[in-house]
Amino acid sequence: MRNFGTSLLLSALMAVGVACDAEDDSFFPGDPQLGSGGPLGKEDSAGIASVPVRDYPDTQAWVVRNQWEDKGTAAAKAAGVAWGANSGLTWDEKYARWIESLPTSAGSADVTPAVAQTIQITTPWGRTLDGPRIDCADLALLLRASFAAWYQLPFYVAMYDNSRWAYLGHFGGRVSNGAWSRVPAFPKYDDVSGTPLADGADWPSDGDLRKAKLLGDGRDDQPHFELGRHTGLYLDELHLNKRAAWVIYYIMLYGGSLHLSDSRNTYNLQPMAMREGDFMVWRHDSTSGHTSLVTQVDDVEGGQKRVQSAYGNIPLKQPEWRDNDQTRSDFIQPGTGDSAHSKWNPGLKRFRVAKNKNGSWVNTWMAADEASWINDTDKPKMEARLEEISTMLGKPDPDKQRALLLLEIAAKRTHLQTAPSSCRARQHREDFFKKLYKLEAENGGKTKEQVDKDHRRLEDYVFAQLDYQQAKTCCWNDTNATMFATIMDYNEKAQAAATAAGTCVEPTVFKARDGDYAIFRNHNSTGWKDWKAGEACPQSGTKDDNEVTHEWTPWCTLQAPQGNPPPGGGSPAHNSCEGRCGGASLDNSCYCDDMCDSQGDCCADKTTYC
C-alpha cells in the first residue's frame, strides 16, 4: 500500500482536474472513435458471440495459449511479473496483482507540471517504463491488452462501426464476414517475443511503429522518452510482439470511455467486490465520458476500504495518482451512476474475459465473479452504488475535502482560461461548488452566500453554466486563451466603471446573443474566432443561449457589505466613514472607491467594506 496522504494533496494543488470528455475533441480533429452498444440486461449472462474460435493467419496478432481461469497449467504455475511460482492465482487475479504492484515516480516535469506521482509500467522482461502521456480510457485499455498479449490470453474489444460490429483483439481486426478494413493485416509485423534477449542486446524495434501518432501537432509526444516521438514509440518499447503493439495502437485510436461502459466489454460491479484493475466510468451523455483506474485496494476496520486510483487526461498527460480522499471525491461525482446519468451505463466496472463458448469467442465473466455483477438494466441497484462507495471509502476529513473541492474548482477555471466555451468545465465547476455548499453547511453551518463570498470569482459568473442542449456555445471547441482575456477585460472594465459610479452591474455572461458574440468581438477583435461547430450540434440554430437555474448568490449581492444593499442602493448613513476612504463617500455611506476599515483606513486587500 502506498499512502502519500496530505503531501500528495498539497503538491497536486495546481494539477489539472478530471477532463476526458468528448467536448474536448478539438484535440482530435476528425476523431475516428467508434460507437458502442446499449444495455444488454440479464440475457447477456451467457455472453454475445463475436467471431469463431480458430486461427486467423491473415489478421492474427498473437496466439492464445492460456485461458483466464487457468491455475494448474505449467504456464499458470510459473512465476510472473508480480507473483511467484505456484501462486494458485487465475490469470485474472494475476492481472489485479500486477496492477497493485505498479510502482510510482515523480513523473516528468515537462509533461505533467505539479503532479506529485505517476505510475510506472513493469514488463515481463524486467523493464520499467514511466507511464505514457495518455487519455483516461486508453490507460485501462493499454494495461489490460498488454497483459493479455504478454501472457497469450484471449482478449478483444467490441466496437460499433457504422452498421456493423467490429472486434479488435488477439485475432486482429475482424467483422462477422472477414477482416476489418479499418486496420492492417497484423501478421506482416514482427513478433520476437519468443526469442530470448541476449544480455546487452538492443531492444528490437519497429521503425514505423515508433513514428505512429494518435494525435497530430505533437499532442501525443512522449518527451520523457525523446522529443518528437509519439505513442507508437511507447508501444514499441513496451512490446516485443510488434503485432500486439499495433493492435493496441488501433484499440487506443478507435476506443474510449464509451467502450468501457459498453456491456459487451465490461460489466457493472458491486462496490465491495472492487479490486485493482477495476475502473470507474463517468458518463455525462451519449458521447462523453471519463475513466479512472483502481490501482490500490486495502481493507480497513469496519468493513471499509482505502482505495487509490490513477487516470490520464485530455490534453494527454501522464497518469495522475489519486489517494483515497481524492479517489472518494472522484468516485461519488455526478456521472458515476446517479439517476440523471444511469441510462448511459456508467459506474464501477470490471473487464470481461474472453472465453470459448460453443465455438465462438464471447466476452463474459470469471465463474468466481458471477455473484458480483449487476444487471445493466437494474438502474436502482446501479444508482445505489454511489452511496455504497461513499460509505465504503469512509468519511473524509472536512479540511482535506474542502481543499480537494477547491482544487477541482481551480482546475475547471484553469480549463476555461484556455477553452472559454467549455460547457462541461462550467458544469463541473458548479457540481463541485454544490459539494462545497453541502460540506460547509454540515461542518460549520455556513450559508451559500458565505461560501460564495469566500470563494467565488468574477470569472465564475462570466462563464456561467449553460443548458448544454440549448446553447450553441457548447459546440464551439476552438476558443482560446486570447478570447478568454478579451471576455474578462470587457467585464473587468464594466465592473470598474460601475464601482466608480457607485453602482453594481451583474457580469455579462459569455454566451450567444441573437446568434452572435458581437459584444465581446467588438470590444477587441484581435485573435477573435468566429463560431463554428466542433462536434455534432443539433442546437446550432439557437439565437440566445439558455443558462441553467443558478444556485449561487448573485454577484451584486456579494459586493455589498453583509446586511446592506449594494452600492447605489440607498444604504443607511454611516457617518463615521464620511470624508474618509481617500476623501470619497457615497450616499452618506461607507461604500467607497477604496475600501476602508472601521477607522476609515484603506484595507490592504482593497475588498473589505467598513
Image: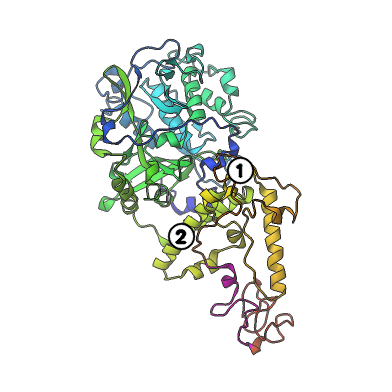
Q: From what the image shows, is residue 208 above or below residue 556?
A: above
- In the image, residue 320 lies at what x, y percent? 49, 43
> Could you say whether the residue bearing mark 2 is in a helix, strand or loop?
helix
> Who's the residue at 32% across and 48% down the image?
385
Main SS of the magenta part reads: loop
Residues marked 1 and 2 touching at CB (< 8 Å): no
Foreground residue, 34 or 148?
Answer: 34
Give the residue type that dot 1 points to.
Answer: Asn
Please state if 571 lies on the left or on the right of 70 as rendered. right
**166 displayed left or right of 116:** left
User: Residue 477: which disc?
Assistant: 1
Q: Quadrant of the C terminus?
A: bottom right
Q: Disc number at residue 347?
A: none
Read off the residue under disc 2.
434
Q: Position of residue 571 (x, y in %)?
A: 61, 83
Quadrant location, the N terminus: top left
Q: Amino acid at mark 2?
A: Lys
Q: Which residues are magenta?
A: 553-574
